[in-house]
């Protein structure tokens, strides 16, 4: 089943995906790494890097920098799509784009395809 998207510019779709990915990274980095301190980006590493808190914090900082760059790139793509006169999408289209990978029909279809391969 293929989603029937209205004519949304490809740059806009990629831009929205990058901004959404960056926002999820910000949530993970700020809430889980810094506020709750549940884990660090590379906390699964073994000794000696796994126990070096300075190294862990540096890796978290680089992760945040990468998320900022993705957010900036996504915003640039959205601005470029808008400047070219393309339609960047309505709120409902953007939400469908964000929620489409986790939709129940897609999950059910994936399960039926995986069971057919066995």
Image (tube, rainbow, N blue to C red):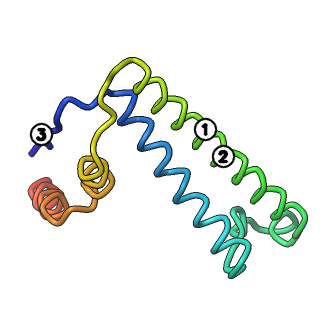
Q: Nearer the viewer, mark 3 or mark 1?
A: 1
For the point 64% across and 74% down, the residue is 32
Tell me which numbered mark, 3 or 2, is placed earlier along the sequence. Answer: 3
In 3D space, how far apart are the residues under numbered discs 2 and 1 (Cα atoms)?
A: 6 Å
Tell which of 33 and 94 is nearer to you. Answer: 94
Q: Which mark is residue 45?
A: none
**Dot 3 alpha-carbon crowd within 10 angstroms: few under 14, some 14 to 19, many 20 or more:** few
Q: Are marks 2 and 1 in contact (CB under 8 Å)?
A: yes
Q: Position of residue 23 (x, y in %)?
A: 54, 56
For the point 61% across and 60% down, the residue is 26
Residue marked by disc 2: 68
Q: Position of residue 54 (x, y in %)?
A: 90, 64
Label 3 sits on a secondary structure element that is loop
Tell which of 78 and 31 is nearer to you. Answer: 78
- Quarter location, residue 111: bottom left
In 3D space, how far apart are the residues under numbered discs 3 and 2 (Cα atoms)?
A: 31 Å
Q: Position of residue 28 (x, y in %)?
A: 59, 66
Residue marked by disc 1: 72
**Dot 1 alpha-carbon crowd within 10 angstroms: few under 14, some 14 to 19, many 20 or more:** some
Q: Which mark is residue 4?
A: 3
In 3D space, how far apart are the residues under numbered discs 3 and 1 (Cα atoms)?
A: 28 Å
Label 2 sits on a secondary structure element that is helix
């Amino acid at each position: 089943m293929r989603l029937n998207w209205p004519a949304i510019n490809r740059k806009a779709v990629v831009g929205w995906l990058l901004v959404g990915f960056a926002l999820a990274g910000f949530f993970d980095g700020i809430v889980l790494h810094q506020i709750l301190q549940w884990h660090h980006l590379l906390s699964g590493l073994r000794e000696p890097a796994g126990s070096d808190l300075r190294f862990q914090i540096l890796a978290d900082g680089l992760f945040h920098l990468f998320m900022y760059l993705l957010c900036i790139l996504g915003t640039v793509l959205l601005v470029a799509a808008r400047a070219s006169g393309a339609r960047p999408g309505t709120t409902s289209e953007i939400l469908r784009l964000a929620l489409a990978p986790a939709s129940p029909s897609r999950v059910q279809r994936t399960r039926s395809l995986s069971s057919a391969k066995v």
